[in-house]
Image: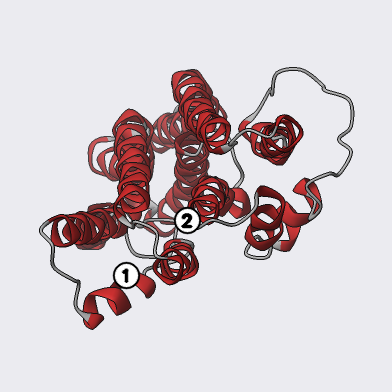
Amino acid sequence: MLFWFISFVCLLFGLREAFRDGSFARGRPDELVTMARIRDSLHHFEETLASGNLPEERDWERLFQASAPWGALFSESLPELRAQGASLVPTLKRFRELAVSHEKNLRDAKARASGAMSQALICACLIPVFGAFLYLLVPGVDERPIAWTFLCLLASGMGGVAATWLLGLAESARWGGLKKDAHPRVLESLGFCERLIALLRSGLAPDLAWARAVDSLSPELTSRWGADVWRRDPEDLGAARSLDESIASLGSRLRRAIQVGLLEGTPCEERLESVAQSLRAEIRAFQERELGLLGSRALKPLFLCVAPAVLSLLVIAVFVSFRSQGGF
């Protein structure tokens, strides 16, 4: 009995600490905390420049040393604007709006996925507690403590599989159905749009701005989008069916906006801003779709892992009780 109590208490404390900082199953600091710091730093820069003062050197260093991809975005865009004598306030405002929008999406998604996170906690705790109650209440089970402990460990393993499965579903839904290794592409794509707009505001030609902005992309996105702004795109396949497809088609949409501006001889900044805004809306739409389906998808690990484990413990406990009383 003491073993069950200590195990249960340790499990609760461990899960509480894992869920407290929001970094469970991710192995890194909470991204919401990082986004809040970046948002506050950008707001401080805006207020400092708007008041007619200059930010101190340590403020610049703190901004440039932000976590990826923010640090690279700031260190590559803002110095170019300063060197060309362009205003920093509009670009800082766009960066802050991007940070606020991304933080809001993460908070809303985390709140919507909290049900699956709670189910994962229940899956991890239910089977050991249920096994302990059967051990205490069903006659004959306490006569075989070693065998019963082994069965409970097996059943708890199935509960752990269900909890891990649920956490994976919740994490995927929070990011619009993207796989874990594709999560950085969301911010990388949004940051690329802002980087491109900042280069245009610094006075660079659109085709040269594209070539310079592509240099900061990951190799995978570079191969998808292409380094040449006049690259010929494949046939349009229609609306994107997933967030990954939407990000993959972003390069084509940005290039078309630049090509139209160059051929017409008109500024393409507004077109690029429209493409960036549509990407944010698509990200939010795919998040809403995946979070809406999360409730029904969460039933699968419950029925395939938790229910068989609980029913197996119950059937075995009843069988052992009848055997110990001379039944069967």
> Vertically, is 197 above or below 118?
below
Locate residue 30, reporting x and y percent: 32, 58
> Vertically, is 137 above or below 79?
above
Q: Which numbered disc flags the more N-terminal residue, 1 or 2? A: 1
What amino acid type should be assigned to the residue bearing mark 2? Phe
255 left or right, relative to 187: right
| Residue occupying the point 52% across, 47% down | 197
Asked whether residue 290 is in view, the answer is yes
Tell me where residue 16 sits by quadrant: bottom left
Residue sitting nearer the eye, 317 or 68: 68
Locate residue 93, reporting x and y percent: 30, 47
User: Furthest residue to the front?
Assistant: 265
Residue sitting nearer the eye, 259 or 102: 259
Residue 253 got which mark?
A: none
Report which residue position mark 2 lands on: 150
Locate residue 97, reporting x and y percent: 32, 42
Report which residue position mark 1 lands on: 63
Colour theme: secondary structure
| Residue occupying the point 41% across, 35% down | 317
Locate residue 244, reporting x and y percent: 66, 37
217 left or right, relative to 238: left
| Residue occupying the point 18% across, 71% down | 54
Mark 1 Cα shell of 10 Å, populated few (<14), some (14-19), many (≥20)? many
User: Furthest residue to the left?
Assistant: 51
Q: Foreground mark, 1 or 2?
A: 1
